[in-house]
Amino acid sequence: MMTLIVGVPDSGKSALAEEKVLEQSGEGKRIYIATMIPFGEEGRQRVRRHKKLREGKGFFTVEAPVEVLESVKTIQGIGDATCLLECVSNLVGNVMHDGAAGRKMPEDAGKDSVFVLDDLVVRRVVSDIRGLCRLCKNLVVVTNSFPSDDASYDDDTIRYVKLMDQVNKELMGISDIIFEYREGEWISREHI
């Protein structure tokens, strides 16, 4: 079963996700898949804060900033585990800036084709998450949503926000339960 938690930054996504993992896992194994690369002191503080939130909840943590599926494949007992993937927005940014996506580009596409690269980023992220769904008993996925019309965005940020929107739409299509933060509250719905 896949539960998707979609919200703006600092909306309480992590707390809700951990609550759902605790509900779904019962006494079973809990794996936290961390995708953030902590740049600078602010990044390190964020990691410390998230670790403190998870303290005493029985999570086994795996650092997987890019190769999510590959990083957890061999964990003993993962088939019976409830996994928490946090956060897709970090994963998309990491994959977007990882040279591996460009190396996988078809030769006839042209090296400067942003469309092809973006399609590869979306496919790579969604494919790994689909693989996680098949691998573990339950998967809770945290992702951010961003306004698409912010005038302060530079070209790279516009590209990133579009990629996030594409990935989120795909993830909504494969999720069993979706929690979405709207107008200050969490709305839940089951995928039909």
Image (cartoon, helix red, strand yellow):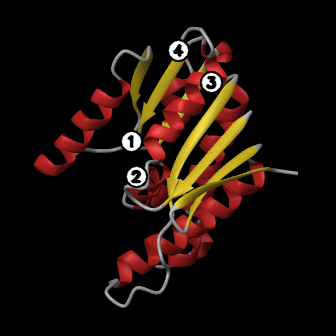
Please report whichever mark, 2 or 1, sits nearer to the chain's N-terminal start. 1
Q: Is residue 71 left or right of residue 136?
A: left
> Foreground mark, 2 or 4?
2
Q: Residue 161 appears at what percent x and percent y?
A: 47, 72
- In whole angstroms, how far apart are the C-alphas of marks 2 and 3? 25 Å
> Residue 90, which numbered label?
2
Which residue is situated farthest in the bottom direction here? 151
* Mark 4 residue type: Ile
On the image, which quarter does residue 138 sit in? Answer: top right
Q: Nearer the viewer, residue 53 or 1?
A: 53
Q: Earlier in the sequence, mark 1 or mark 3?
A: 3
Distance from the alpha carbon under mark 2 to that under mark 4: 22 Å
- The secondary structure type at the circle numbered 2 is helix
Residue density around tag 3, few if under 14, some if 14–19, many if 20 or more, within 10 Å: few
Classify the position of the N terminus by image quarter: top right
Amino acid marked by disc 3: Glu
